[in-house]
Image (spheres, rainbow, N blue to C red):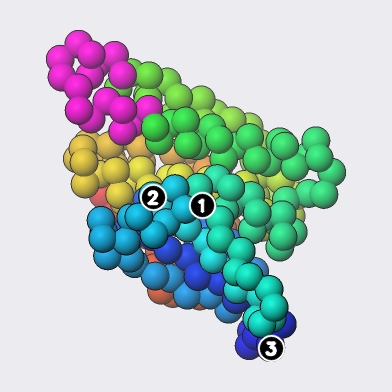
Amino acid sequence: MTADNTTPTYVLRYFDIIGLAETSRMLLTAAKVEWTEEHPEWPQEKPNQPFGHLPVLVEKSGAEDEEDFVLSESGSIERYLARKFNFVPTDNKQMARHEQLRDQHLDAIIAFFAQLSLVDEAKKEKREDFDVMLDKVIEIHTALIRKNDDCGYLFGEELTFADMSAYAFYKLLVMYAVTFEADVAPFVKDKITPEVLNLLRTVESDPLLHEHVEKKGSFVAHVLTE
């Protein structure tokens, strides 16, 4: 899509890692808008960010008399993009059901990283917290996919914010968290149910995300690799 003088364009600022920006990358790609990604020099650029951290989204209106819209916090960015580009339902209750999954994903991610700096019994206890949360997330995903006639999506028959958030969640644990703790990738891959694997395949093969998968590579292929 080529922007005219009034069509918004976007800049996503983050590190060159999966981290907490993968869902935003997917949303921007699926929305077929013009966007670029910047990797600020860190920590030199830290004081120039709204809250001193990344990711940051900049929406440029193209109108000379309108200021750029700058948004921080990964969850706020994702919700803004998902609502703006209709990747969540308009009904508030249904929207909340979609968005709560994203918060469950983040809770499990936080639980994983919380145990990295601990040792002995404290580490074991926190790692068990993560294991329990991961099992619960997978259980919920599996149940939603089954309830949705095993069509490959969590809700309905089209790609949603919830699907992209789930895909990014598993990708972060398998391909990024492994750089901190080597056993997490095989641990997570062994727990992925056939339903969740079908979700990952369906999201990855969605035409709206073709460009993203072409650029980043197949996560599903990585999951299936021993």
Image height of 1 relative to 166, above or below: below
Measuring 71% from the left and 36% from the top, which residue is drawn there?
97
Which residue is label 3 attached to?
A: 4
Q: Earlier in the sequence, mark 1 or mark 2?
A: 2
Left or right: 158, with 211 as reference point? right
Asked if disc 1 and disc 2 are in contact, CB closer than 8 Å, the reply is: yes
Q: Which residues are magenta?
A: 111-126
Q: Earlier in the sequence, mark 3 or mark 1?
A: 3
Occupied quadrant, residue 157: bottom right
Mark 2 residue element: loop
Occupied quadrant, residue 39: bottom left
Instruction: Specify few, some or many for label 3: CA neighbours under 10 Å numbering under 14, 14-19, or 20 or more.
Output: few
Q: Is residue 192 visible?
A: yes
Image height of 124 relative to 225, above or below: above
Image height of 23 relative to 190, above or below: below
Which residue is label 1 attached to?
A: 72
Instruction: Specify few, some or many for label 1: CA neighbours under 10 Å numbering under 14, 14-19, or 20 or more.
Output: some
Image height of 161 relative to 215, above or below: above
Residue 81 lies, in percent from the top left, at 64, 58
Mark 3 residue element: loop
Name the magenta segment's main secondary structure.
Answer: helix
Identity, as a three-letter code, of the amino acid under mark 1: Ser
Residue 24 lies, in percent from the top left, at 52, 58
Residue 53 — which label? 2
Label 1, label 2: how far apart the Cα atoms are: 8 Å
Instruction: Specify few, some or many for label 2: CA neighbours under 10 Å numbering under 14, 14-19, or 20 or more.
Output: some
Marks 2, 3: nearer the viewer:
2
